[in-house]
Image (cartoon, grey):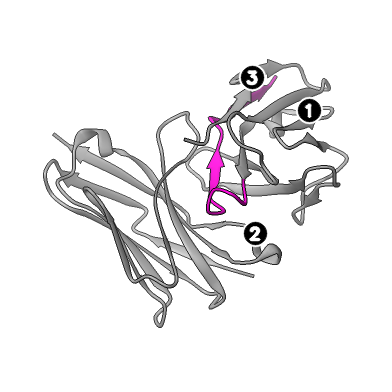
């Protein structure tokens, strides 16, 4: 099955700096890669996703890049703010009816220091 | 946007009792619903996948007789933890997926279960 590795497990950045989280996946058939933000005591919230036919996607201060050949994808947060502090999870999923399960990375705890 | 609700948000129960958690997709029809368990400072662990009107598919190691899942309609799924024990204390999160919304998966706010 799919295996998703996520690094780093914790990340502390100064407000205004950039944060980068990296994930690798093992299943070359995976074609959907979402990123979730989870605040304490809450469920994960989808913040951005990318599909395998695209190499990069941006939404304001958040961007995701995908390298299918190397099987890794990354989340980039620019101009970090204290409210960006949370746990971030990457995930991967195959397409089609048979592959409808997300496999999650281990999570990255991001702390943005004011 | 797509909203998934869970009820209750937290529950405390005595060991040996059963607890039911409801998951609803409020503004879309969920063809598939998922139940996850999350222990402190850990990632989400998929427990089971259910399609409306069908039996749930459980992940390896998850006891189907202990974690009863019912997906009675396209907007409602329930998870019943039967004969709960302290080791079942966890954060339970449901998720719903609609084939109409780019196959995105939306998560509920979670239910904190504490078994005394």
Task: Report whether mark 2 lies on the same chain as mark 3.
Answer: no
Q: Circle 2 marks a residue in which chain?
A: A
Q: Which of A82 and B90 is in front in this view?
A: A82
Q: In which quarter of the image is residue A75?
A: bottom left
Q: Is mark 1 on a helix, strand or loop?
A: loop
Bounds of the magenta span? B98-116
Whole-percent x, y for residue B103 in the image? 57, 53
Estimate the spatial distance between the alpha carbons at disc 2 and disc 3, rounded to whole Å.
27 Å
Q: Mark 1 lies on which chain?
A: B
Chain containing the residue with disc 3: B
Q: How far apart are labels 1 and 2 at the CA level?
A: 29 Å
Q: Is residue A73 left or right of residue A92?
A: left
Mark with earlier residue (1, 3): 3
Contact? badges 2 and 3 (CB < 8 Å): no
Label 1 environment density (alpha carbons within 10 Å; few <14, some 14–19, many ≥20): many
Q: Is mark 3 on a helix, strand or loop?
A: loop
- Is B76 inside the magenta-drawn segment? no
Name the residue that disc number 3 marks: B8
Which of discs 1 and 3 lies nearer the camera? The answer is 3
Q: Please tell me whether mark 2 sits on a helix, a strand or a loop.
A: loop
- Which residue position is annotated with label 1? B84
Q: Are marks 1 and 2 in contact (CB under 8 Å)?
A: no
Q: In this view, does A55 lie to the left or right of B22?
A: left
Q: Tags 1 and 3 in contact by the CB under 8 Å rule?
A: no
Q: Marks 1 and 2: same chain?
A: no
Residue depicted at x 64% and y 19%: B8
- Residue shown at the point (25%, 33%) measured from the top left: A83
Q: Hey, which quadrant is residue B95 in on the image?
A: top right
Q: Where does the image place residue B40, in percent across and percent down from the top left?
A: 51, 37
Binning the other alpha carbons within 10 Å of mark 2 as few (below 14), some (14 to 19) or many (20 upward) gives: some
| Quarter location, residue B115 | top right
Q: Where is residue B76 in the image (x, y as percent from the top left)?
A: 72, 31
């Amino acid at each position: 099955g799919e295996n998703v590795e996520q690094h780093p497990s914790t990340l502390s950045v100064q407000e205004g700096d950039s944060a980068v989280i990296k994930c690798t996946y093992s299943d070359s058939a995976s074609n959907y890669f979402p990123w979730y933000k989870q605040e304490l005591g809450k469920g994960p919230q989808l913040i951005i996703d990318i599909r395998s036919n695209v190499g990069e996607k941006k939404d304001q201060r958040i961007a995701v890049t995908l390298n299918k050949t190397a099987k890794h994808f990354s989340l980039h947060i620019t101009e970090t703010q204290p409210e960006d502090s949370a746990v971030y999870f990457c995930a991967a999923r195959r397409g089609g009816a048979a592959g409808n399960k997300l496999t999650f990375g281990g999570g990255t705890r991001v702390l943005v220091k004011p | 946007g797509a909203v998934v609700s869970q009820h209750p948000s937290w529950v405390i129960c005595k060991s040996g009792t059963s607890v039911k958690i409801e998951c609803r997709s409020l503004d879309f029809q969920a063809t598939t619903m998922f139940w996850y368990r999350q222990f402190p400072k850990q990632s989400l662990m998929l427990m089971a996948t259910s399609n409306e009107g069908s039996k749930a598919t459980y992940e390896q190691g998850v006891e189907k007789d202990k974690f009863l899942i019912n997906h009675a309609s396209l907007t409602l799924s329930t998870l019943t933890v039967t004969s709960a024990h302290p080791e079942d204390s966890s954060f339970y999160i449901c998720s719903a997926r609609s084939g109409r919304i780019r196959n995105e998966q939306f998560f509920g706010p979670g239910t904190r279960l504490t078994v005394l």
